[in-house]
Amino acid sequence: MAKADEHGRLIATAAKAALQPLGFVRQGRSRFWFADQRFWIIFADFQPSGWSRGSYLNMGVKWLWQARPTLDINYRPVDFVPFESKEQFSPLIGRMAEVAAQEALKLRGQFKSFADVSQYLVAHASSEGWPVYHAAIASGLIGDVETSNRLFERMEAWSTYGYDWELELKSESAAFAALLCSPEQFRSAILAVIDRTRRTMKMAPDPHCLEINRSSGEP
C-alpha cells in the first residue's frame, strides 16, 4: 500500500510541476488535469493500467458545447511507463509530464481562434456523428452558414443504430440547425450548453467565452 501511495504522489507531483504553470488544474484526486480555454479544454490524462502500476499519457481536447463526458480529440504521445521504484520512476514520469506540457502548448497554438477550430473540424468531419456535429457548430459560430447547414443536413440524414445517445445527438443537431438563420439565437443556444458543461466540470462561469475575434482569437 505504501508503494501504491508513493506511486500516485510521484505522478501528481510531476504533473503539478509541469502543468500548473500552464493553467492546468487537477480534477479532484484523479490523474486527469485540464486547462480552461474558455469554449474548450485541453486535457492531460495520466492513465493507469489495469495490469501493473505505472502510467500512460493521453492528451487531447474537449469542446464544451457538448455536455456529455466525452473527449473529442484523444491521442497518446507517450506509451506506458511502469513503476518499479521511486528512483526508476521519478525521472520517467517527470519526462512524461514535460511531454504533456509541450503537447498542451502545441494544441493552444493549433486552435488560436474559431477559424482554426472550424477549419480543423470541417477537415476531419469524415466520420458521421460527433465529428460532423462539432464541425457544424464551429462553422455556424464563424458565420459560415452554408457549410454549417450542409453539415447539419448530414446529421439529419445520418443512419443510426437507434441508440439513445445517437437519437439525442440527432435531436440536438436539428434544434441547432433550426437556429442558423438567427446568429444571435444560435450563439445563445451554444453558450447555454457551454455554461452547463462548465458548471458540471466545476469551472467558473464565462458568459463572454464566444466573444472573441474570429481571426486572432483575442478577446
Image (cartoon, rainbow, N blue to C red):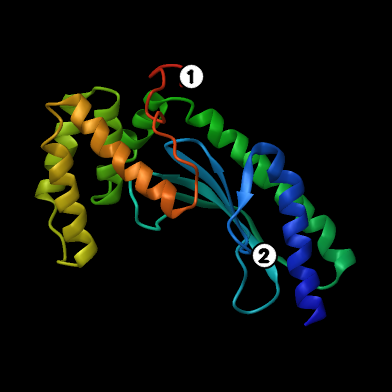
| Mark positioned earlier in the residue sequence (2 or 1) | 2
According to the picture, the residue beneath numbered tag 1 turns out to be 218
According to the picture, the residue beneath numbered tag 2 turns out to be 55
Furthest toward the right, the residue is 87
Q: Does residue 27 appear in this view? A: yes
Amino acid type at image mark 1: Glu
Q: In this view, does 119 lie above or below 29?
A: above
Amino acid type at image mark 2: Ser
Figure label count: 2
How far is the residue under mark 2 from the one under mark 1?
36 Å
Q: Residue 43 carries which label?
A: none
Q: Residue sitting at 30 percent across and 41 percent down?
A: 192
The crowding category of the residue bearing disc 1, from other C-alpha atoms within 10 Å (few below 14, some 14 to 19, many at least 20), is few
Q: Where is residue 143 in the image (x, y as percent from the top left)?
A: 24, 22
Q: Where is residue 204 in the image (x, y as percent from the top left)?
A: 49, 42
SS for tag 1? loop
Q: In this view, does 148 lie above or below 218?
A: below
Which residue is more in the foreground, 171 or 127? 171
User: In what quadrant of the picture does the N terminus appear?
Assistant: bottom right
Furthest toward the bottom, the residue is 1
Q: Position of residue 135 (x, y in %)?
A: 29, 37
Indicate left or right for 118 with 219 as reference.
Answer: left
Indicate left or right for 92 with 185 as reference.
Answer: right
Q: Does residue 136 appear in this view? A: no
Indicate left or right for 133 with 214 as reference.
Answer: left
Q: Nearer the viewer, mark 2 or mark 1?
A: 1
Q: Where is residue 183 in the image (x, y as percent from the top left)?
A: 20, 25
Q: Residue sitting at 14 percent across and 44 percent down?
A: 175
Q: In this view, does 179 lie above or below 83?
A: above
Q: Residue sitting at 46 percent across and 35 percent down?
A: 38
